Amino acid sequence: MHKLINGIINLEFALLIFKETEHLLGGCLFSQGKSVGLRVSCTFLHCTIRHYSANACLLPLCQLHGAAVTTVEGIGSSKTRIHPVQERIAKAHGSQCGFCTPGMVMSMYTLLRNKLQPSMDDITQALAGNLCRCTGYRPIVDGCRTFCQETNCCQANGVGNCCLSGEVNTEEPEQEKPQLFDKNDFLPLDPTQELIFPPELILMAETASPQTLTFQGERMTWMSPASLEELVQMKTSNPKAPLVMGNTNIGPDIKFKGVLHPLIISPTQVKELFEVTQTPQGVWVGAGCSLSEVQSLLEKLVIQFSEEKTELFKALIHQLRNLGSQQIRNVASLGGNIMSAYPNSDLNPVLAAGSCKVSVISNAGRREVPLNQDFFVSFGKTILKPEEIAVAVFIPFSRKGEFVRAFRQAPRKESSFATVTTGMRVFFSEGSRVVQDVSIYYGGMGPTTVSAAKTCAALINRPWDDENLSRAYDILLDELALPPSAPGGKVDFRRSLTLSFLFKFNLEVLQKLREMNVIIDELPNKMQIHPLPKEIQPSLQEFQHVSNNQSNLDPVGRPIMHRSAISHATGEAVYCDDIPKTDGELFLAPVTSSRAHAKIVGLDVSEALQLPGVVDVITAEDIPGKKVRPFGGYTEELLAATEVSCIGQLLCAVVADTRAHAKRGASAVKISYEDLPEPVFTVEEAIEKLSFFEPRRVLEKGNVTEAFKSVDRVYEGEIRLGGQEHFYMETQSVLVVPVSEEKEFNIYISTQAPSFCQEAVAETLNIPSNRVTCHVRRIGGAFGGKVTKTAILASITAVAALKTSQAVRCILDRGDDMLISGARHPVLGKYKVGFMNDGRILAADVQYYANAGNTVDESVLVAEKIVLHMDNAYNIPNLRGRAAACRTNLPSNTAFRGFGVPQSIMVVENMLNDVAMVLGRPADQIREINMYKGQSVTHYKFEFCPENLLRCWDECKLKSDYSARCKTVDQFNQQNRWKKRGISIIPIKYGIAFTDSFLNQAAALVHIYKDGSVLVTHGGTEMGQGIHTKMQQVASRELHIPPSKIYISDTSTNTVPNTCPSAASFGTDANGMAVKNACQILYQRLEPIRQKNPKGSWESWVNAAFFEKMSLSATGFYRGPDLYIDWDKMEGEPYAYFTFGACCSEVELDCLTGDYRTVRTDIVVDIGRSVNPSVDIGQIEGAFMQGLGLYTLEELKFSPSGLLYTRGPSQYKIPAVCDVPLQFNVYLLPDTYNPHAIYSSKGIGEPVLFLGSSVFFAIKDAVAAARSESGLVGPFSLDSPATPERACLACASPFTQKIPASKPGSFKPWALNI
């Protein structure tokens, strides 16, 4: 435990930055979704100890006076003892890259400190604010589930038949099914062993009287008054100074927008702001109370008072459960939430509809201000005067006959700003359906919370019936009109939601009136609306036992825990930015273009150089070697010198003594531009202007043109797929350390391709590669996004290190990372398909247009893989595919897990879906009819056997009980008008290895030391996929020693040179063979020693070999398959083998809002004989969830000028715990064999990502059922991702059909349609 007294600190630091900068503790903290534990002593009302989880990136350091802060390192470590939470998440395989793991641990730890026996709902609520990009969340939830009392289920601790799955195994199993983990091995949770609250802080809380606290920083003063009177005086003297409680509003402004507040007032010591007073009319709640405290208070009042008095309380609780996350609610205050006056506020519409009011105070005295339409005057502004302070909020009791409801829709179900919110209240006199009073407010329908006053006026003094409600819908539509170019976009959807919410309110009110016997006609069950299901069920993970004759010491094929999982969970794992700062180290911040297509007229760095701490500015002129990076026949400038071609292009970089000074300097650099005409943003614009990166690729088999003449039907369609941000948890990170002699550099970097970075830096600095050593210990996620741009950033940072002769660190903020580093390629797919009436597809012509961005990067290679995979699982005798990489003025897109395959196959699967809809047949039948069968040949003349593809398909149908569930889905849809279910089953055939043959090689270096310990180094990088763990298993098998004797060192270019990128799902295949080769050489070398002493120990053999002067070191090498594709002949062998799989998903869709839940997912994958089932199943689940995000959730939005809007987790939503299929089953196909890879395994990192599309097609199936209610049948357009907006509008409900269409070209849209 560390105690800081009178430390000199930067007041603009949040806890996260302070912790990292000062290196008070080891480990890592993630700046979104990361939790720390706070054990806070309360200095008013009464002294108690409360435990809170909080976001370290938002928590102001000065706010922590009197608090004990516990980070993940504080609850347990490998040096002392690990905490049960750390152990269970690690041993349940809930950690892959490990960067998010400390946050998961602390969220769960805090929950257990407050509630020893949590429910599953408690657990999912606690984890809702944490993000993970690797695991798919299922193993994290399973590890945490072992703490709750719902663990009697047969599946709570691993795998096997489950009582919840509906399957009954009547046969006696030959042997018990293997499990991923055994909960009986876990340490018990002993609350008596937890950390105590520091007695010094308890004494301070009990005895010390409040006193004014003042902290003075470099640019900011932080004051905390001791009394309300003092607060009033401070605010009177400084009316512009913000009041900060939770810092959830001011903090992001400081962090992301560079807003400077010379004075901040923190009234956390003012007891009046935290008082709760109950009156006969309602309850006054202190404005300083956190949202968690407000929720807890209201929940207690709901129990205490009758139902009729707590309508408003329940509506507020409903909103609070989904407002932000637990970490946010723990610190955000009620008053702050109101005074922020966000237009899409969750609470303000409910408070306003509920006739709440605010008590405010100033030098002029106290007054009460109603929360109504006059309270919110403009964006972020209220009617209160600058010097006035909100002290308390009055929340009234409801009356008999009064009903209050709240609704919200958000891009993600939890931890997401709302798209539209509403609060609705209606009051009837006893025994009547005539409306006495009604109040309706909306958020998200303008710059402020708005009142639907005209709609309310049309309802008052009229009966609550269909006739008056129908009139109200029309009035509401006119009253809340949004211009088509309104900020935030989604205009039709938002307008539709206002009507849908009123309709939902109508249904709930009618139900209440029936319960009160005011009306007697029954509402048909079909019309009723129930919440979507949300309870996560235990899931199945099935894999094969190792063979009976395998040695117990041989770890291959067993579910071994990730070798760094404990370090991840304890925070001891070191990432690039955890490396301690050296004396004189500098920080680099990039300066990027603010124009999409322009000449650079001027670059003025004078102001930046005058700022405190700024050392230098690096420009293109400072680069001593190559100023460009070549790729695919094109070049990309490291730093633009004369012209920019996208917003976010790197121009120069500021080097300063601290991160804050570097960022401040970067914002002070002045760039002047001269705009160039007609920038290109969309693929349509690129097609029109023939803006492509060459070559464009074509593959064809058969005679497509002739085949179209002989088919029964021809259909043409298209689908647009959006891009996807990598959103690795660890942003781009590099530390360049110059060695004092001969221009030598050590580079510590987060990259998939250390040799690629080494070469780039060497060429940039004009020095040999042998002077540059790249080290990669571990990567906090990559997914293809840490290759090309990483090398450019490393090169720029190295120039700074060369010029300043100091170590230079560059860690991109999330917003800069998203702006600079590129994403998955958006694709427009157009197809023409010819088919017979029996469902056989005889001809298809598919054209793909990928939005490559401003530089070629790997876009041509992506286009190649697109056409190579376009057949997926289907034998279409006449098939033509064409792919073009479109050159546009958006940031350059790059490699992303799947490398074009998820876009390629999505277009083809959508085509098959359309064929099924044209024929009126189930889509799975069309897929089966057209699948490869028997010995087959692809469209590029590559022979393969599809037997395991068909096995996966059949097994998936069997395991998912597909036929029976299809009937259940149909029955559900007949019984529900406003909710629909959909189900889909999708196959995958994915080629493994690099088409460029030279990349299919690997090397390894293995040392045996005299004590018998073994050091293994190989060319693969550990980024969460478990490659180091698998290499340890390989070495253990080949050397016949336990894994505990084997250590895997960091990947470095001075131990294994000329490595290939860890990509293409080929890392284990290649590096595993290299490690195997090296170990076999060494084991064979020891054979004479073993023969002399067959009963000796490993250590004795090694020692004897040393004395006999035998080398105990070996280099292993793997020369991979010679793969190729001849584009002129349109034939080749581009892949070593195929990984097969199939996935069935079922969803439940709210047709009025577009919200959905994945009810169940079953995945069957052929991965040969798994080297490590726990790692491979984790890869399968993580890839699926990333695919689910791609196809249903994640949206990149660009402004009409080409600026990326979605530059952070508040705007860009990746899947969270709330998006996990409620039942998530994974089955590894048994009894399979693959002669082309190590130990008969298969690559698995990428293939399953596409299977996330099964959720897209299940949504489309549900939408089709909804459309049929409106008489709409046949194919329809649904672009990817199938967001709630797209799903809702596609359902074509009576409410969406009321929205008048805006005339294209008559307005400038808020965002480009990329």
Image: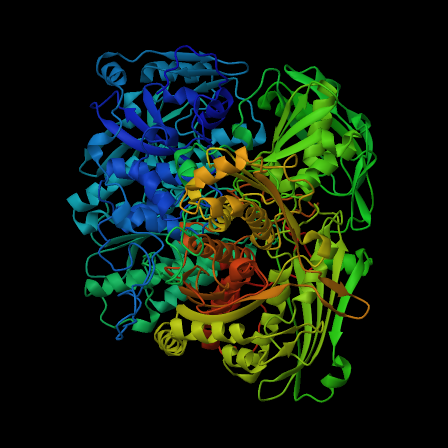
Tell me residue 595's x, y (percent). 74, 39
Identified at 72% across, 33% down, the residue is: 795
Q: Nearer the viewer, residue 852 or 632?
A: 632
Q: Nearer the viewer, residue 1215 or 797?
A: 797
**Outermost residue toward the front in this view:** 1092
Q: Nearer the viewer, residue 1123 or 34?
A: 1123
| Image height of 805 relative to 734, above or below | above
Q: How is the image coloured?
A: rainbow
Say which quarter of the image contains residue 116.
top left
Tell me residue 348's x, y (percent). 39, 42
Tell me residue 358's x, y (percent). 34, 33
Identified at 67% across, 19% down, the residue is: 806
Q: Is residue 223 left or right of residue 110?
A: right
Tell me residue 1296's x, y (percent). 50, 65
Q: Nearer the viewer, residue 1001 or 234?
A: 1001
Which quarter of the rendering shows the N terminus? top left
Q: Is residue 655 left or right of residue 514?
A: right
